[in-house]
Amino acid sequence: MNEEYNEETRNLHDQCKKYSYYHVTLTMRDGSSFDGIIEDVDRDRVSVLVGEDVMEGESEHQGDNRQYFDGYGRPRRRFRRFRRRNFPLGSLAALALLPYVTPYPYYPYYPQPYYPYPYY
């Protein structure tokens, strides 16, 4: 069983090295999952920049029931902050790239003939 664990750990280490500096989803053995950017891979740990959502003026609105609007009725801005976290390679169960899908297909630009507007 120890050889299987070493082989599995070695495969995850190679996969982490391959996906260095990519935005990935990490699934841990306890079922939790994180998304982040792999920054560094050692023999026994992975250093990941994990993203967290932060709302503008979060400390000012702690007691406020309205989560998405400030006092003037406009929505508060949302930011994404990345913090460095280290995960042991042995607690990692799976690793997958985040799929980025283009929102619309690319259409090339074709110049149209110029027809001036008729002025009546």
Image (spheres, helix red, strand yellow):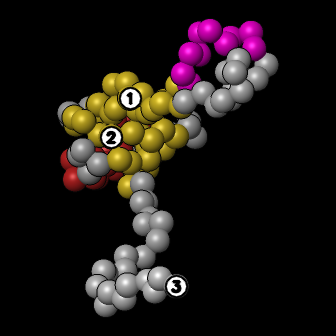
Mark nearer the viewer, 2 or 1: 1
Q: What is the x, y in percent for residue 61?
A: 67, 13
Q: Which mark is residue 113?
A: none
Look at the image and say whether residue 59 sits in the magenta stretch: yes
The residue singled out by tag 1 in the image is 82
Helix, strand or loop for disc 1? strand
Q: Position of residue 82 (x, y in %)?
A: 38, 29
Rounded to the nearest whole Å, what is the CA distance between mark 1 and mark 3? 60 Å
Q: Is residue 104 visible?
A: yes
Task: Identify the magenta region.
Answer: 55-64
Q: CA distance from mark 2 to mark 1?
A: 9 Å
- Looking at the image, can residue 85 be seen? no
Left or right of 31: which side holds 48? left
Q: Are marks 2 and 1 in contact (CB under 8 Å)?
A: yes
From what the image shows, is residue 68 above or below residue 94? above
Residue at image coords 23%, 46%: 20
Residue at 28% over, 85% down: 111
Instruction: Looking at the image, tell me whether mark 2 or mark 1 is earlier in sequence order.
Output: 2
What's the amino acid at mark 3?
Tyr
Kindly state the secondary structure of the residue where label 2 is placed: strand
Residue 91 place in picture, x, y as percent: 43, 35
What is the three-letter code of the residue carrying label 1?
Answer: Phe
Closer to the observer: label 2 or label 3? 3
What secondary structure characterizes most of the magenta part?
loop
Name the residue that disc number 2 marks.
37
Circle 3 sits on which residue?
120
The answer to which of 24 and 110 lies nearer the viewer is 110
Q: How many marks?
A: 3
The quadrant holding residue 101 is: bottom left
Q: Amino acid at mark 2?
A: Ile
Q: Residue furthest front?
A: 120
Q: Nearer the viewer, residue 13 or 60?
A: 60
